Image (cartoon, coloured by chain):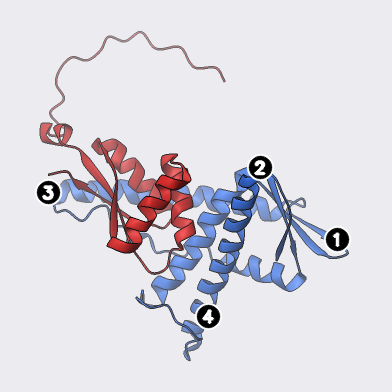
Chain colours: A blue, B red
Amino acid sequence: MRLLRANKNSLVFLFSESEKAVLLDILKLYPCVPPAHHRHRLQSQPAARDAENQRLLDEALAEQRTKTKRLLEGWLRSPRTFLATPAGFELHLRSGDFDWLLQLLNDVRVGSWIALGEPEELPRGLPEDETAAMQACAMELAGLFQMTLLEAIEDSAAI
Amino acid sequence: MSQPAEPLVLPDLEQDTSTRADADLDRGWLVVCWNDPVNYMAYVTHVFQRVFGWNRQKAEHHMLQVHNQGKSVLMRETMEKAEHYVHQLQHYSLHATMERDE
């Protein structure tokens, strides 16, 4: 995956076939962070109000997730997202796509970390357990795509 | 974009005692972001810029507070606005909470 072109309105990346397949596999894992992970606040307060606020937070997050999932499905269906070229596949991202794609990749990264037991120190190698190995891979790959996207956004802002 | 016309309804002057206590309205609420080992520093900076509209320098300052001190107080707001910001930050998968400003 490498950046081909960048300006304030769009980014174009070149993907190999296998990189494209990995990105699509990672995106399919969304949503990954369990809803119960988000707590409303630390400070204690009357239980009834806290429960109500937590319910509102859960609803707001569920609504946003549904919206993001819908954006993802539409984006993946669009023939303009990945264009086949002799060099590989060009991924075309408009400025409106940067943010939700980053959110989505981060959800997969954080969700995989939670599934690994929220280790204070991130695993340096692959865990022996197959499920944990898959989760560690998803976390690292989502992070790799995320950082590449962030660097490209930074470059495009400097243009 | 056009805006709908305002309805002709007189304001309700009766005090609403069923919702928020006066103390909640008087005191501010702090939006706090907590450190974790999984979110990238560049991502946290990006999120602060997006959610609060801060410039890069200010966003980086708060990101470094989170990283070095374990947390950063990002805003002091009314309860409703603090809730809004916490929802936004949590949607970006950051660990954010709100606390009453004592």
Q: Residue at x 22, y 51 (%)?
A: A51
Residue A63 visible here: no
Tag nearer the camera, 3 or 4: 4
Residue at 35% of width from left, 8% of height from top?
B8
Evaluate whether label 3 is on the same chain as label 4.
yes
| Residue identifier under label 3 | A46
Name the residue carrying label 2.
Answer: A8
- Residue B31: horizontal and vertical position, in percent? 28, 46
Q: Amino acid at mark 4?
A: Met
- Kind of residue sitting beneath label 3: Pro
Which part of the image, by quadrant, shows the N terminus of chain B?
top right
Q: Cα distance, mark 4 to mark 1?
A: 31 Å
**Mark 4 near mark 2, Cβ–Cβ under 8 Å?**
no
Q: Residue at x 47, y 89 (%)?
A: A129
Above or below A76: residue B82: above
Secondary structure state at the residue bearing disc 1: strand
Among numbered discs 4 and 2, the one appearing first in the sequence? 2
Residue A46 x/y as whole percent = 12, 48
For label 4, the SS is: helix
Q: Residue at x 28, y 58 (%)?
A: B71
- Mark 4 and mark 1 lie on one chain; the one further toward the N terminus is 1
Q: Quadrant of the C terminus of chain B?
A: top left
Amino acid at circle 1: Thr
Residues at circles 2 and 1 in contact by the CB criterion of under 8 Å = no
Q: Which mark is residue A122?
A: none
Judged from the image, the secondary structure of the residue bearing numbered disc 2 is loop
